[in-house]
Image (cartoon, rainbow, N blue to C red):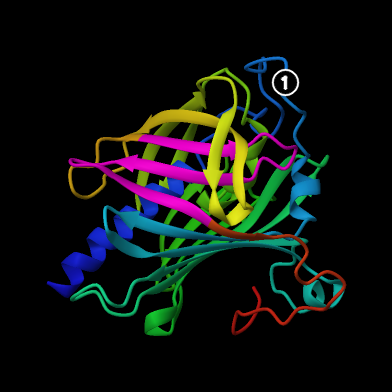
Amino acid sequence: MKATLYTVFSRCMICVLCALCAWTPRTASAQTIPGAPVDSTVMTPLSIQELVELQETFRYQVEYGFLTLGEVVVEGRVHTKAERDTMSTPSDYRLTMTIYGNESIPFVGKREVRFTSLFDLENKNQLVERRFWRDDLHDDEFERSLIEFDHERDSVRFFDRGEAEAVLPLVQPAVGGSLVFYASRLAAGYQNPYSLNVFIENEQADLEAATQESAKPRQVPALEGDVMAWFSEGTTNIKGPFGFSGGFKSWFTTESERVPLEAWVKIFVGNVKITLQSYQRNPFHGESQQLDQPQPN
């Protein structure tokens, strides 16, 4: 029973994360500003390099009806030279997404799962993924699953608990799931529909979304009141729990930072919702960071 409920919880979280990170095209122009703006008020977004260097921290609450499923914390960091020098896979940047399950949910217990991407940038907007892995922190199991991107051999290697599972050709642009969090923000406010190949939990799925209408006010308690937000709606064929319908909605601020505010995932009855609770920029600016991995890779 406990394992079954945790699987349901995990898939709810994964579907919501994909909704939050909904926009980016499959082609080599994936990390460029797309198509025509939805109206004349659209402000040019920051480049991915500018977003990364903000070193943002986001905290989201995940709910289904009256039930709080847990939280998701998203953190972007710039590595210092000292950190790069200690890494077996050197990179300039990292992005982590950590899922915290609600321990008060019966039969679920403590669940803490972290997804990490190590990456570099070319020409300010081109993401170059190095490694993407999952840590099951509640079980003290690091690199539970791992994807390595070998740009010299043009290959992608998959591992499960340290055992090699598959090797696939590297087709650009190639990223692990979490880096869509940056690429997606370039597309908010632009009306052309965009699609994405998602690889997560040993599945390949398709995801497509677009801005549907002009910006409207949306109440966001974390930002102290109403803010103007772009609304996106899309679909995905990710296999989800509770009759997940494949439909989702998401909202981004209209400012150049395009802060992801909220996402809804449709299920058989109602929606699973993820809502921004807090947002920080540069919380570690100017400091050398102690990375929370047992040994940087």
Visible in this render: residue 187? yes
Is the residue marked by circle 1 packed among few (<14), some (14-19), or many (20+) residues within 10 Å? few
Instruction: Please give left or right for residue 86 compared with residue 98 in the image.
Output: right
Q: Magenta stretch mostly in which secondary structure?
A: strand
Image quarter hosting the N terminus: bottom left
Whether residue 269 appears in magenta in the rendering, the answer is yes
Measuring from the top left, give residue 115's x and y in whole percent.
51, 64
| Image x and y of residue 20, in percent | 49, 45
Q: Amino acid at mark 1?
A: Thr
Quadrant of residue 247 within the rendered picture: top left
Q: Residue at x 35, y 53 (%)?
A: 202
Give the quadrant of the C terminus: bottom right
Residue 6 in the image: x percent, y percent?
25, 67
Magenta stretch, residue numbers: 248-276
Question: Which image quadrant for residue 117?
Answer: bottom right
Given residues 158 and 136, the one toward you in this image is 136
Out of 277 and 145, give the one closest to the viewer: 277
Q: Is residue 161 above or below residue 238?
A: below
In this orientation, does residue 200 appear? no
Q: Where residue 41 appears, x then y in whole percent?
A: 72, 20
- The residue where tag 1 is placed is 41
